[in-house]
Amino acid sequence: MNSSHSSTRPWVLITGASRGIGEAFTRRFAHEGWNIVLVARLIEPLRTLARHLETEEGVKTIVMAADLTEHGASEQVYQEVKRREITLRGLVNNAGCGVDGLFARAPLPRSLEIIDLNVRALVELTRLFLGDMLSEKQGLIINISSSACFQPLPFNAVYAATKAFVTSFTEALWLETKGTGVRVLNVCPGLTKTDFGIRAGMGDFKSDPFAETPEQVVESTFRALKKTQPTVISGWNNRWRVRIQCRLPHRWLLFLVDLYQRFRKRSSKRESGAKNEV
């Protein structure tokens, strides 16, 4: 099932590994010769993917079902890795969630769940595994932020704020870990052809002509790892948008963001109505 030298390969832990960008990272790391710890809420999709990777890539895999919105879940993941006597060389904090709509109308537990997954779990896992990596003087931490981090987003207020935290936190860690042998990278995808938009109520990104595939996001990440930058913005259109935004007066930026978000909401409602009529 596994190649003869799989026991000597480095291990990487990937959260949200069962689909979307997380699955693409899982497949890419396996193709690059890494053993994988796959973490997500549902165990069966992880097992299916793990069996495929073991057969096709000859790597070792471990699957862990964990709801990282629950307090204590990150510690349980860490302790399970230690129990198996695995020295982790890589960590990809990919798991994330969001919800579309007015903040005042969203259930408070749902908003706190977004913070728990996007921020608290990411910080916990980073802190738990970073100490080991620093002791070993080698390691890789990839935190998945979003191009939403560069501006506030009405109707996605909590989500965008959590991603702003991730970017600020990760870039600070990039500075703190310089010269330690640990590589830290902040990744900012834009719209991506996954089911995230549908699950978050933001619309179907798969039909957007400017949306990237998960594989394109992963490719941008691996290219950036060969450089020394703290952040990579995936997609030429996203990079240009951020560059323009940074040159705008802040009030102008807020006005344009508000205009775009309200237009998007109206368009989404029209599309939903058209589908219901078919």
Image: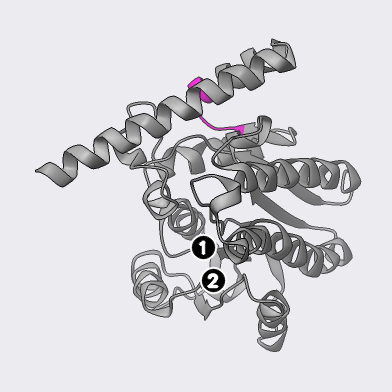
Magenta stretch in the rendered image: 233-238
Any magenta on residue 40? Answer: no
Residue where numbered disc 2 is placed? 39
230 versus 75 height, above or below: above
Q: Dividing the image into 4 quarters, which one contains the C terminus? A: top left
In this picture, residue 224 sits left or right of residue 64: right
Q: Is residue 137 left or right of residue 88?
A: right
Residue type beneath disc 1: Gly
Report helix, strand or loop for mark 2.
strand
What is the quadrant of the N terminus in the image? bottom left
Residue at the image point whose x is 40% and y is 55% from the top: 199
The residue sitting at 53% across, 72% down in the picture is 6
27, 150: nearer the viewer = 150
Asked whether residue 187 is in view, the answer is yes
Circle 1 SS class? loop
Q: Residues within 10 Å of mark 2 (few under 14, many from 20)?
A: many
Tag 1: Cα neighbours inside 10 Å, few (<14), some, or many (≥20)?
many
Circles 1 and 2 in contact, beta carbons < 8 Å: yes
Under mark 2, the amino acid is Val
Label total for image: 2
Q: Is residue 145 visible?
A: no
Q: Would you place residue 36 above or below residue 203 in this image?
A: below
Residue corresponding to mark 1: 16
Which color scheme is applied? one colour
Residue 77: x %, y % from top left: 66, 78
Q: Position of residue 38 (x, y in %)?
A: 52, 70
Q: Position of residue 122 (x, y in %)?
A: 70, 60
